[in-house]
Image (cartoon, rainbow, N blue to C red):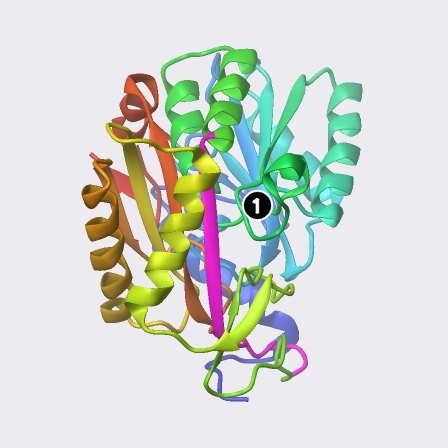
Amino acid sequence: MRKIINAPENFVDEFVQGILLAHPDLVKTPGDDLRVMVRADAPVVGKVGIVTGGGSGHLPLFKGYVGTGLCSGVAIGNVFSSPSSEQIFQATKAVDGGAGVLYLYGNYGGDVFNFDLASDLADLEGIQTTMVLGRDDVASQPKDNKHERRGVAGIIFAYKAAGAAAERGDSLEQVATVAEDIVEHTATIGIGLAPTILPTTGKPSFELPDGEMEIGIGIHGEPGSRRGPLETADEIADDFVEALVADLALTRGAQVAVLVNGLGATPLEELYLLYRRTHQILTGRGIEIVKKYVGEYATSLEMAGASISLLELDDARLELLNAPALSPFFQER
C-alpha cells in the first residue's frame, strides 16, 4: 500500500481536521465529532437547511459541498461506510434555522436507513425534514426502475440547485421540489479501470485485469453492467453519450450541463479527451452545452476511471446553477 497517511484508523478524522484548519472561514464542526461539519454561519435563521452525507473516500463529495449556496451540513462515516443516525441528527440540529431541513444524499441502503432514523429523531425535536435521493447512475438500473438507481456524481447538480433555492428563501417543500426536478433530469454513467486500495485493509476494492474496463462501476467498486477490453477515449465517450441522451430523451434544440468527472487517479488530460468527444457528439446532434464542468467532483480515493453526467436544462434550472456558491471545493460567481 502506497499512501501518505498516518495510522489507518485515524485517516478520516485527520483529513477532516485538515479541511477545518484550511477553511475556517467557510466551515466548522458544531460539536466534538469531526465527522459532522456545517457551513461557518450555520444555522441561517429563516432559511431551509440542507444536510448530505455518506461514506468517506469520495472528496470533494461529500465534505466539499458544504458552504454558501450549497449544502448546509454533512455527516460522514468511515471509508465507504454510512454515517450514523446520531451524526446525521447532530448535523440536522446544527443547520436548522426554523424553516426545516432537506436530506439530500445518494440512494444507498445504509444511508437511507440512517437518514430515516435521523429524521425520526429530528421529528421528536420539532424539526421538520424531508428527503430527496440522488439516483442518476443509468447503469445500475434500467429507466423503468429508476427509483432504485444509485446516486453518483450527478448529485452535484442537485446540491447546486437546491442550495441556490434555499439561499433565495424558498420553503422546504419548494427546495425539495427543485432537488427532485434536478434528479429527474440528470443521468450519469461511469467507467472503472483500476481499483482503489482501502486504507484500513490495504486491499483493493475490486479486481480488474490489466487492459480491461468495467462499464457502470459504482463509486464504491460496485459491479458494473459489463466488462471488456479497454476502448479508446472517443469510443468510450460515444457509448456513454449515446446512453445518456437516450435515457434523458434529449432532442435537437435541448440545452444541457455536462460534468466529466475523474474518480481519483485519472489525469485531467484524459478527462478533457472525454469532454472533447462529448462536446463533438452533442453539438453534432444540435444539443447546446450551456454549462461545463471538468475535474474531480466525486471520487473513490485513487480509483482510475471517469464518469460523464448530463443535466437537461431549462431557464429555471440554469438560473439556479448560475447562482453564487462558495465552499472549500466549489465556487460559482
Residue at coordinates 51% horizontally, 79% vertically from top-left?
Answer: 5
Pick the front one: 145 or 270: 145
Q: Does 18 appear above or below 187? A: below
In the image: residue 70, left or right of residue 321: right
Residue 81 rendering spot, x and y as whole percentages:
68, 58
Taking the spot 34% from the left edge, 42% from the top edge, the residue there is 25
Q: Residue 38: x, y in percent? A: 50, 39
Q: Residue at x 31, y 21 (%)?
A: 314
Residue 253 on image: x %, y %: 24, 27
Q: Quadrant of the N terminus?
A: bottom right
In the rendered image, the quadrant that contains the C terminus is top left
Q: Is residue 101 visible?
A: yes
Which residue: 40% across, 73% down? 265
Tell me the residue that label 1 is attached to.
151
| Label 1 secondary element | loop
Q: Is residue 200 magenta?
A: yes
Give the residues in magenta: 185-201
**Is 270 placed above or below 294 here?**
below
